[in-house]
Image: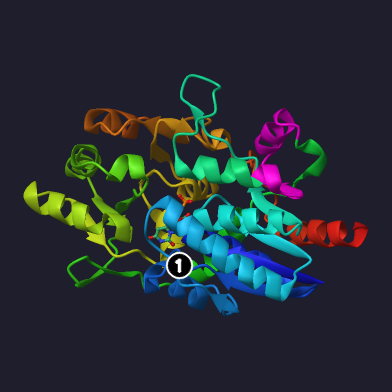
């Protein structure tokens, strides 16, 4: 049995790290990196730290518009799949790499397994799905053409049911939770030095707030991003912000222009440092789907700067609160305290990787 896994972006490396380890004990895996994330600290560092096998192919495709990037991936992935003739293609999440791999495999009649199926964003105050962000388009289309839909939560299963995809869907839990648990101990042993955007090496302070912010809707406009960055000025502890490469120039310019002093802009950190920061932050501010869940796993409160609900499971007891990108609203939300019920865990039992591999092998054997 041959499985061809396609990854391309940071959150996919983390999920593949835990799944590939189990997968390779049962079947042959061909790993394809599309190249969507290519900087050392967005890609190679994850392969090194998480001990992910070296990709068999690196397509080196990054940048350009969504259409340009996806189109180039379609052509290159078709060549690889025609040559390798896998029994199944495995994809994760919601990036352009996910969609491109799914479209190619579907046209070649290769079954697709989609991990993190059934995630849907709804507009606040409605139950309407939104197709206003690229990730939603990618994940919705991928689900439609996949043969095996593996859901991280029961609510994701519910979404698949509503779209008549239930007969192809199985709840397995969230491999991000597996990774969070598996690497927590190792993360505690990190030195946690950070590299500022000016190239200086600094130590992570004992007390800090952790922020990530990279969604197009928050970073494509100076005034929106400035509203978010200004929050740091009102916090008691330093706001540490590893900056996504896409957002580096704008963030640096705004911090200098408005002389923001309580904000530490650093290069993206590796997964182990991020895991440590999640566990030790005072609170987390983010627009990342991954970080919202990790904050929840750690029992650290999260303020999500989005007007979309993607992980409603985390939005209980003030554990994850939505805010618009308005400084005063963000500060008001940061003042609310959470309650943590340690029994409540909708993301599985930390063994999603085994379940994912069991479902894949079961599917192929039945076929
Ligand atoms: N992450 C990291 N270093 C950083 C920021 C994030 O290792 O500087 C990790 C973290 O575990 C997070 C994951 O990357 O959950 C997901 O990344 P991202 O926010 O890019 O993607 P999303 O979750 O929004 O799809």
Q: Between residues 41 and 184, which one lies in front from this camera angle?
A: 41
Figure quadrant, ligand 1: bottom left
Q: Secondary structure at mark 1?
A: loop
What percent of the width, then of the height, locates residue 95?
Answer: 51, 53
Q: Nearer the viewer, residue 63 or 226?
A: 63
Residue 71, position as x, y percentages in the image? 50, 57
Q: Is residue 248 magenta?
A: no
- From this viewpoint, is residue 138 visible? yes
Furthest-right residue in this view: 366
In this orientation, which residue lies closer to the viewer: 29 or 302? 29
Q: Provide residue 2's location: percent of width, then percent of height.
A: 77, 72
**Residue denoted by label 1:** 61
Residue drawn at x 33%, y 30% is 324
User: Is 340 drawn above or below residue 348 in the view shown?
Assistant: above
- What range is drawn magenta here? 143-164
Furthest toward the top, the residue is: 125
Q: Specify the quadrant of the image occupied by residue 1.
A: bottom right
Confirm or reject: label 1 Cβ below 8 Å from ligand 1: no
Q: Is 324 left or right of 60, judged from the image as shown?
A: left
Q: Is residue 25 left or right of residue 262?
A: right
Give the percent coordinates (x, y) of residue 21: 68, 72
Q: Nearer the viewer, residue 194 or 73?
A: 73
Q: Residue at x 75, y 69 (%)?
A: 86
Quadrant of the rendered image containing residue 228: top left
The quarter of the rendered structure image containing the C terminus is bottom right
Residue 94 vertical placement versus 303 (above, below): below
**Residue at image point 25% right, 31% down:** 326
């Amino acid at each position: 049995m041959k499985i061809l896994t396609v990854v391309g972006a940071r959150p996919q490396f983390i999920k593949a790290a835990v799944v590939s380890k189990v997968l390779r004990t049962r079947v042959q895996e061909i790993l394809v990196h599309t190249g969507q994330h290519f900087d050392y600290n967005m890609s190679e560092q994850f392969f090194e730290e998480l001990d992910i096998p070296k990709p068999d192919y690196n397509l080196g495709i990054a940048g350009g518009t969504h259409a340009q990037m996806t189109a180039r991936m379609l052509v290159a992935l078709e060549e690889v799949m025609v040559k390798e003739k896998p029994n199944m293609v495995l994809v994760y999440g919601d990036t352009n790499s996910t969609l491109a791999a799914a479209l190619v495999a579907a046209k070649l009649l290769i079954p697709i397994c989609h991990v993190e199926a059934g995630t849907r964003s709804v507009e606040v105050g409605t139950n309407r799905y939104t197709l206003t962000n690229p990730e939603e388009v990618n994940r919705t289309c991928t689900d439609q053409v996949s043969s095996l839909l593996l859901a991280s939560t029961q609510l994701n299963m519910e979404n698949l049911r509503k779209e008549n995809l239930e007969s192809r869907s199985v709840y397995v839990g969230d491999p991000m939770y597996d990774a969070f648990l598996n690497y927590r101990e190792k993360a505690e042993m990190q030195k946690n030095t950070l590299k500022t955007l000016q190239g200086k090496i600094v130590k992570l302070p004992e007390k800090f707030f952790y922020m990530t912010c990279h969604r197009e809707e928050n970073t494509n406009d100076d005034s929106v991003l400035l509203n978010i960055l200004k929050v740091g000025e009102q916090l008691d502890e330093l706001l540490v912000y590893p900056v996504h490469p896409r957002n580096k120039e704008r963030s640096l310019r705004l911090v200098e222009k408005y002389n923001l002093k309580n904000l530490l802009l650093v290069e993206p950190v590796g997964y182990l440092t991020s895991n440590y920061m999640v566990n030790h932050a005072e609170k987390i501010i983010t627009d990342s789907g991954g970080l919202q869940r990790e904050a929840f796993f750690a029992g650290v409160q999260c303020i999500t700067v989005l007007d979309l609900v993607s992980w409603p499971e985390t939005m209980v007891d003030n554990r994850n609160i939505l805010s618009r990108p308005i400084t005063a609203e963000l500060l008001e939300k940061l003042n609310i305290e959470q309650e943590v019920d340690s029994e409540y865990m909708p993301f599985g039992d930390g063994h999603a990787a085994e379940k994912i591999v069991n479902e894949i092998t079961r599917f192929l054997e039945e076929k």
